[in-house]
């Protein structure tokens, strides 16, 4: 059951990621440099991310190379998901995989990842523009780290007591 939930989470994240990008590109027709105020802490600003995570290595390598590396990572995530016996791990890995698939799909379709969420508090802006898939990846990684840090080690049976 955990596996199935993990795969469903991956599909839900992928659908939310690709659906939100469709809305930004088509009904909203967001163009480079234009900003839509979406709330007191949120703007929509279209940025084409040609790099890897948070724009790192922009311009380095072809889109096929980056997509191939990401696809290998996604396959490793699905193997991890298949082997897990832990609910938190299944959900977190599913979220990471769904976000990664959404970003690979963008890279293959557009040659870059569609980023559009800009967070801010007043005049203080988060340094990167991101998307739903990025959020899922970050949340999944944080969940894995917390689960690893908070997990209690198994208690060994005391053979002296009998």
Image (spheres, rainbow, N blue to C red):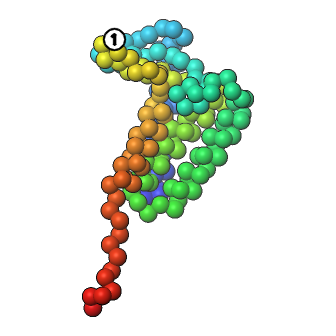
The extreme left residue here reads 161
Task: Please state, as top left, top right, bottom left or bottom right, where the C terminus lies in the image.
Answer: bottom left
Question: For the point 52% across and 27% down, which residue is it?
Answer: 54
User: Of residues 94 and 57, which is closer to you in this image?
Assistant: 57
Residue 140 at x, y = what percent?
43, 44
> Can residue 8 be seen?
no
Relative height, residue 115 to residue 31 (above, below): below
Quadrant holding the N terminus = bottom left
Residue found at the far front of this picture: 160
Residue occupied by mark 1: 123
Taking 67 as reference, is 132 left or right? left
Mark 1 is surrounded, within 10 Å at the Cα level, by few (under 14), some (14 to 19) or many (20 or more) other residues, namely: few
Q: Residue furthest bottom?
A: 162
Quadrant in the rendering for residue 2? bottom left
Q: Is residue 147 above or below residue 33?
A: below
Q: What kind of element bears circle 1?
A: loop
Quick check: 44 above or below 54?
A: above
Residue at the top extreme, as displayed: 34
Q: Residue at x 40, y 40 (%)?
A: 139
Residue 114 picture location, percent across and down: 55, 24
Image coords of residue 120 (percent x, y): 35, 18
* Location of residue 54 with respect to 67 vertically, above or below: above
* Left or right: where 120 falls relative to 25: left
In the figure, residue 62 lies in which quadrant? top right
Residue at 44% x, 54% y is: 90
Residue 38 image point, x, y percent: 36, 16
Q: Residue at x 40, y 48 (%)?
A: 145
Residue 93 is at least partly visible in this image: yes
Task: Give the mark count.
Answer: 1
């Amino acid at each position: 059951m955990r596996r199935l939930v993990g795969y469903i989470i991956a599909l839900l994240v992928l659908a939310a990621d690709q659906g939100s990008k469709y809305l930004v590109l088509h009904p909203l027709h967001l163009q480079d440099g234009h900003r839509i105020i979406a709330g007191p802490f949120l703007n929509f600003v279209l940025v084409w991310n040609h790099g890897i995570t948070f724009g790192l290595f922009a311009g380095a390598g072809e889109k096929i190379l980056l997509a191939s590396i990401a696809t290998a990572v996604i396959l490793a995530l699905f193997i991890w998901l298949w082997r897990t016996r832990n609910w938190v791990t299944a959900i977190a890995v599913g979220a990471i995989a769904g976000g990664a698939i959404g970003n690979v799909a963008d890279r293959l379709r557009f040659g870059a990842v569609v980023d559009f969420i800009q967070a801010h508090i007043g005049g203080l802006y988060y340094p990167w523009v991101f998307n739903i898939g990025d959020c899922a990846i970050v949340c999944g990684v944080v969940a894995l780290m917390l689960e690893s840090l908070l997990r209690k080690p198994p208690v060994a049976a005391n053979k002296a007591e009998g």
